[in-house]
Each structure stands twice: as structure tokens, then as C-alpha cells.
């Protein structure tokens, strides 16, 4: 089995793809900030249709910057690569990168799942970092969207 990898050359990222869990209805990336996670209910990496959702930490105390620390620096037209368990690579072209307040909830289209148009959604935290009882939280999420390149 080949390793699953997310590669974003523009920001110098090559990160393993693990699994994101959804405890209590909250999409949660893998504990290792250098790994991104795929949402199990989304489209698989090698799917022909649907939205593949990847999520990762921006950073974490004790681990430093995460794989998606510079996600907000990606721009429309940038190229991304993903590889699946069989080593098949998909090339993606970024269509947009947006910052959205967490208070507005999750941008619903990232949860489109295995049906509909083929695309990639990558999500991490962003915006202002605030602390409540010593626990840090970011005010926003960064959403990157990309279409498969034929």
C-alpha cells in the first residue's frame, strides 16, 4: 500500500493523509499536526465524483506549525497533488481560498460527500487566536477549493 499524500508545492507542503474523525459532530483532524485527515463520509481520493474533504491543524502547542499553517497563502490557479492508497495521483487546480468566521458555522458544501461535481476541499483554522481559560481557539476557518485537472 502506497502512502496517501497531500502535496502543495506553492507553500512547500507534502503531508501524509490520515483520517479525520467527527466526535460530537465536530470534524477533527489527526492529532499529529504534520498529518491531514480525510473525512470518511466524503468522496475517496480516487473517486470520479463528489467532494473529497481534507482537514488539518494550523498549529498546536507542543507540536508547532501544522501542515496547513500557510493554507491561506494558496491562490486560484495553484496546483495541488493527492495520492491514494494505490499510489494513483490526482492533480487539482485551486479555484478559491476563503476565510469564514467559525461563528457562521461550517461552509455546508464541503460536506457534499461522494456525489455531485468532483472537487477537493481543504480546511484549517485561521483568523484571530483567542484564549478562554488557557485554551486557544481561532475565530475563523480557511477553506480551499480545487477542481480535478483532466
Image (cartoon, helix red, strand yellow):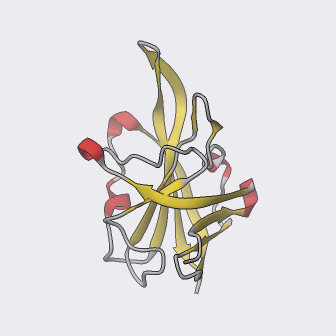
Instruction: Give the position of the N terminus as an image quadrant.
Output: bottom right
From the viewer's perspective, tell me whether residue 77 is left or right of residue 52: right
| Residue 95 at x, y percent in the picture | 56, 65
> What number of labels is visible?
0
From the viewer's perspective, tell me whether residue 86 is left or right of residue 20: right
| Residue 46 at x, y percent in the picture | 48, 80
**Above or below 148: residue 64:** above
| Residue 33 at x, y percent in the picture | 57, 44
Among the 4 quarters of the image, the one containing residue 108: bottom left
**Above or below 122: residue 150:** below
From the viewer's perspective, tell me whether residue 6 is left or right of residue 115: right
| Residue 5 at x, y percent in the picture | 60, 66
Q: Residue furthest top?
A: 133
**Above or below 49: residue 26:** above
Q: Residue at x 53, y 76 (%)?
A: 84
Q: Residue at x 36, y 51 (%)?
A: 107
Q: Residue at x 54, y 37 (%)?
A: 126
**Above or below 34: residue 89:** below
Depth check: give the residue in front, 114 or 102: 114
Q: Residue furthest front?
A: 1
Amino acid at each position: 500500500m502506497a502512502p496517501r499524500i497531500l502535496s502543495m508545492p506553492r507553500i512547500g507542503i507534502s503531508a501524509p493523509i490520515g483520517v479525520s474523525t467527527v466526535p460530537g459532530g465536530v470534524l477533527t483532524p489527526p492529532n499529529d499536526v504534520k498529518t491531514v485527515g480525510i473525512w470518511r463520509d466524503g468522496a475517496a481520493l480516487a473517486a470520479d465524483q463528489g467532494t473529497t474533504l481534507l482537514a488539518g491543524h494550523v498549529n498546536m502547542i507542543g507540536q508547532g506549525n501544522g501542515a496547513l499553517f500557510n493554507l491561506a497563502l494558496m491562490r486560484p490557479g495553484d496546483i495541488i497533488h493527492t495520492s491514494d492508497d494505490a499510489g494513483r495521483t490526482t492533480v487539482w487546480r485551486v479555484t478559491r481560498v476563503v476565510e469564514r468566521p467559525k461563528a457562521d458555522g461550517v461552509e455546508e458544501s464541503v460536506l457534499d460527500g461522494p456525489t455531485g461535481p468532483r472537487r477537493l476541499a481543504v480546511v484549517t483554522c485561521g483568523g484571530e487566536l483567542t484564549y478562554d481559560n488557557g485554551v486557544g481557539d481561532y475565530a475563523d476557518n480557511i477553506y480551499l477549493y480545487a477542481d480535478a485537472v483532466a
